[in-house]
Amino acid sequence: MKRDYTGLQQVLSGLMRRYQERVPDVQAVIDAMIREGMISNANDIENDHIAFRTMGVPNLGIASLEKIWLHYGYQKMDHYFFPEKKLDAFWYAPPSPEFPRIFISELRVNELSAEARQVIHSYTDTVTSDPVDKIDLDNPAAVDEFLHSGLWRTPTWEDFKMLSTESEYAAWVIYNRYYLNHFTVSVHNLPNGYDTMEGFNAFLLRNSFKLNDSGGVIKTSPDGKLAQSSTVARMVKAVFADGQEQDIAGSYVEFAERKLLDEFAHLPRHQVQREHRREGFEAGNADKIFESTYSTQTAKGG
């Protein structure tokens, strides 16, 4: 019996709708792809994965957020660790190939300085029980509302600045909460000329998109089978609790090329399915993609 994915579709479309409203590059990339004849509309885009950033504090983080996706049939897969950024992450395989993978990262708050920990907890400690436990997960509208709700108060500019000096990831999450951080265009099934990271990046640069060059514009896994790029997050106007308005990093769009596994390299293009391509993620790639919202990249005029 075919499983009914209506609820999951509703949750994902709610996420994408708001993400699109908040990240101008999303519509700009889609429009440029349509202009060049790559796709006829946004629904033609294959979404490789979506990603969330979370805080490793009681009642929140991966352990809380993953309950939603496990409920909708996702399967927890590999763990990744980013020592320099003090992050843990897991990826989740979708219940059916037409849905994106999910990547959730979590800040190791306990490894930050006492001052940074104190600032973070002054916000997150107001969450005294796991908020996901209070949601009817069979109600997509309730899940959608939760994923776009602030779980703690808006930070002050001073607190945001202080966190930024130690962990730009922490500052981003304190302001943005658990909003979808990015979605990822799969390029390998696009028309010839656009179906490699090199070809797609040439298209992006031709259309004046600013690309994250940390670790190189194309980040490639050691096996050469997963290549990724991303735009640099544009600055967005943020209003802080103390009334200050400041420009901070918004979000970005990512692009991924999953190459054929060696044992399937002989397959003609029309026979290639998702399972014939490189699966999973690569910590080295993701480590540099995170920096799409960091000042080392945004300061370059993205």
Image (cartoon, helix red, strand yellow):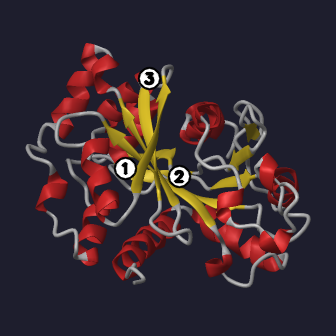
- Who is closer to the viewer here, 202 or 239? 202
Structural distance between the alpha carbons of marks 2 and 1: 10 Å
Residue at the location (52% across, 68% down)?
99
Can you tell which of label 3 and label 1 is closer to the viewer? 1
Q: Is residue 100 left or right of residue 46?
A: left
- Asked if the residue at tag 2 contacts the one at tag 3, i.e. Cβ–Cβ closer than 8 Å, the answer is no
Report crowding for label 1: few under 14, some 14 to 19, many 20 or more residues within 10 A (C-alpha): many
Q: Is residue 174 above or below residue 186?
A: above
Residue indicated by mark 1:
176
Residue at the location (44% across, 23% down)?
165
Residue at the location (19% across, 56% down)?
132
| SS type, badge 2 | loop
What mark, if any, has residue 277 been given in the picture? Answer: none
Structural distance between the alpha carbons of marks 3 and 1: 17 Å
Q: Amino acid at mark 1?
A: Asn
Residue indicated by mark 2:
251
- Asked if the residue at tag 1 contacts the one at tag 2, i.e. Cβ–Cβ closer than 8 Å, the answer is yes
| SS type, badge 1 | helix
- Who is closer to the viewer here, 56 or 158? 56
Residue indicated by mark 3:
165
Residue 96 pos. (x, y %): 50, 69
